[in-house]
Image (cartoon, coloured by chain):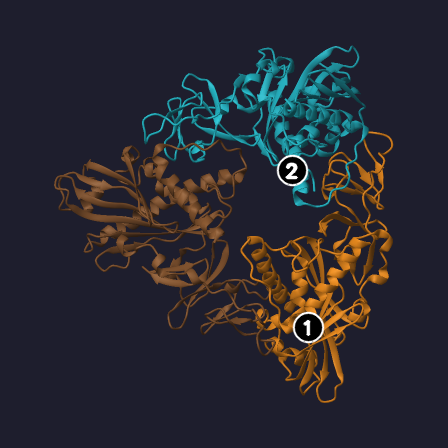
Chain colours: A brown, B orange, C cyan
Amino acid sequence: MTSPTYPLNVDQPYPRNQWWVAAYSAEVERDLLARDILGERVLLYRTEGGEAVALSGICPHRAFPLEKGRLVGDHVQCGYHGFTYGADGGCVLVPSQSGVPQKSSLRCYPVVERGDLVWIWTGRADLADPALLPDLGAVGLGRPDWACEQHPVCEVAARYTLLIENLLDLSHVTFIHATTIPGGEKVAQIPVAVIETDHSLTVQRKGENLPLNPLLKMQFPEQDGPVHQHFDAEYLGPAMIRTGGAVHDAASGQLLGINNFLHMITPAGPTSLRYFVITTRSFGLENPALGQINLGMGTRIQPEDSAAIEAIEQVFQSGVTLPMEISARVDNGALKVRRRLEAQIRSEQSA
Amino acid sequence: MTSPTYPLNVDQPYPRNQWWVAAYSAEVERDLLARDILGERVLLYRTEGGEAVALSGICPHRAFPLEKGRLVGDHVQCGYHGFTYGADGGCVLVPSQSGVPQKSSLRCYPVVERGDLVWIWTGRADLADPALLPDLGAVGLGRPDWACEQHPVCEVAARYTLLIENLLDLSHVTFIHATTIPGGEKVAQIPVAVIETDHSLTVQRKGENLPLNPLLKMQFPEQDGPVHQHFDAEYLGPAMIRTGGAVHDAASGQLLGINNFLHMITPAGPTSLRYFVITTRSFGLENPALGQINLGMGTRIQPEDSAAIEAIEQVFQSGVTLPMEISARVDNGALKVRRRLEAQIRSEQSA
Amino acid sequence: MTSPTYPLNVDQPYPRNQWWVAAYSAEVERDLLARDILGERVLLYRTEGGEAVALSGICPHRAFPLEKGRLVGDHVQCGYHGFTYGADGGCVLVPSQSGVPQKSSLRCYPVVERGDLVWIWTGRADLADPALLPDLGAVGLGRPDWACEQHPVCEVAARYTLLIENLLDLSHVTFIHATTIPGGEKVAQIPVAVIETDHSLTVQRKGENLPLNPLLKMQFPEQDGPVHQHFDAEYLGPAMIRTGGAVHDAASGQLLGINNFLHMITPAGPTSLRYFVITTRSFGLENPALGQINLGMGTRIQPEDSAAIEAIEQVFQSGVTLPMEISARVDNGALKVRRRLEAQIRSEQSA
């Protein structure tokens, strides 16, 4: 049988002292929204003052799911017996009595809102430091000089690590996305470099002297000759991976622009995840058609990747005998990321 | 993970030396009816002489479900190889041979029919004493001087204890049934008394000096002034709970009448139950509209309760992390019932 | 709880050093066909030269199901990262690199094609001897002097042993197939003989002096008087059971002809199987209507048997308490087959 934490060789499937994307900012409104995150039921809403709130979504009284209750001002009222909690999780009312029971508060998750994303910290609250977020500005988020598009969030019935591995081995582009990513048919053959820093690991592919395909021509209408194009996969921690990258004029080496796909991955449970995609772009801000193209590519690419990793998860769940895993040299970066993730998870357990 | 027997702290989910409702009398006819009861497949039918019979529903020959066979007179013929059993469970025929194998009888469950209900005893047959049934006459069943209505039986995908707890904490009425139970919006705030006897435990709420709402006006057309109204929850063992109760004239203290909801709860398996409801009424026998009102309330209230406890069961099944349980003072009665049920289950195991 | 290997008293549910039918020959074409066999995902296709091939269906690189890839000549290309394997299972290409990783081949199953059936060997390849196949000619397969019809393959949600037991106790014919098998209403009462050889075990029923029913009259139009008709169940190993058999003129004892139902049973996983049926006939080759009759009987009989054993499997899966199993004298043959199967499985484990 497949280990429940495959491909990681650890006891726990996810690191918890970590910021994860719970929702796009626009999804968190004056209604109760429940999402499973790392196997916990999280309740999201926005206070009258506009603050995003993340509380435990299960009433500690009799385990009723709180999203079936309602907001009363900034308070959450359970739909079963009316236990009521404030935005800090504290119990403020038990209708059948005066006063509230001891230890009756909901867990309150640290939240920060950055880049139009609601990030929650799933580990020890005293360690929740916004400085541990990925450098969002560096990838084009929250910057007036870049354009960006939010793609529809989707739920994928696969363990989150399968999506990380999918994105870190872009040789799949040639097979899964051959018809949906212009230029993708050659990606598998581009040589790979792995670049490591403390906060990221990039599997870098630089397509050299590529002829201008129709997409590049539309993105860079001034360009005539061939280009160098990056097909990077940059791991910025388990919650965010950047793909795509810079395009340069091949003749002069001059930067034409950067087009990123940002992939935000949030484990829902051991074999399910929520997938947020944002495209960011340093050029063509005056041309909304480029955003439409990015959104259109997302609507084709994401279902292809989701279907691929769901097919693998179904193999795991089916109980069929699995062969011994083999890896290619191109998997070097993905294997290093496995080691990083394992080290992150183990360090929490020993702490 | 939630314990499979939560909220009970025992190894077995149900007491077996216990009468449970298997069916309404009218459901048991000259057809084979199979019901799972306490994790056992029970076959119900009526003999030509009119006796209700409850046998094991699995053929001991090759485990074929007997409800797919047929009745031959009072005998049950298996649909696979024709093994045939009498109404006492004894094997009477194996078509391929003369004589029958040893030990080839079906388990035969003790049955009594009372109050238009078919009760079966799921434990040791020598302990099956009809005197252990709840006092049905006291709650208005089988009495010519009371009216009663059978509500449709429903299957609920939740452990039976969640329905017991639901009924014993009627402060939920204010939130789950605010629009379906007249006067229910105030229930959570009525003070509670817990009355214990050997055979019952009542969580008693007495609404004092309540104004006549339209339902009360229809039930007691002679009444003008305010009333005292009981919102009792009387535990008569795990198989039956009575809610509702007496209405008195507030001025004189005179009894106007009693309107009970009787809830018969039968575990199907560890996380499923069958739910029978009968309303009984000591007044207005000449007015069939009152029965229609009780039936109408049932069609709205039961789905609300079923949905609530199924939502909790889904939380348990989902594997999400649960908070530590807290209880309010109003839960005192329900917690005492947990202790009673645990004691009943443990006494069987030590016996 | 039912043992996962019930009714066998062993640790493993199936013997592996065994030929099983993977597909009808006509099902294996120039497309990739995946079938789960004994809990393994097997990929079937035919080379350009016409050879049937059976390889492991899971890519050892990242566990992608290979049936979602494609055939390139005789090679299988994974649909995820393009790893490519030859018809012997050897890895021939990893697109992102020159050379292939060590130990990167797919398991290749021994295959033989006989009687328009693709047989695969699921155990140790060095033991795969075509001489271990059942004697197909003896039952009318692959013979120009017999007619045969392939019935549609069906998937049954039950452990394979339930189908073996179904076929070996034809007393069920009287109850399950009373209206679909002419003469079947009497089968349960015909005495049984069990005939054992090294390679087969036959539960033999010989109907004596049976009047000519309409089916027999159509099969043997020259015949006037009563017949002796065999209702055999011949176990030729777990992969094949023959039912039906010879019809003789009762007066002279002369053989009129043989009509067999061949049942090929292939476990898909622990609680599922694939069921292939072929009818063979030594007479009436000039009359295609007889083939249509056999096919028509199959379309009625097989769903009846599938439904019966699926009902039993559902009982097992439901978790309801099972009674102690009892057996009749007529089960003697089926019980001996259990012992044979257990011995076959145990001999592999001790080897």
- Compared to residue B207, the image places residue A186 above or below, namely above
- Compared to residue A62, the image places residue A193 above or below, namely above
Q: Amino acid at mark 1?
A: Ala
Mark 2: few/some/many CA within 10 Å (<14, 14-19, 20+): many
Nearest the eye: C262 or A77:
A77
- Name the quarter where the N terminus of chain A is drawn: top right
Which residue is the site of mark 1?
B289
Which residue is the site of mark 2?
C310
Q: Amino acid at mark 2?
A: Glu
Q: Chain of mark 1?
A: B
- Compared to residue A107, the image places residue C257 above or below, namely above
Residue B301 at x, y = what percent?
62, 67
Residue B14: name its quadrant: bottom right
Element carrying mark 2:
helix
Nearest the eye: B92 or C74:
C74
Q: Chain of mark 2?
A: C
Q: Evaluate if marks 2 and 1 touch, with contact meaning CB atoms under 8 Å apart.
A: no
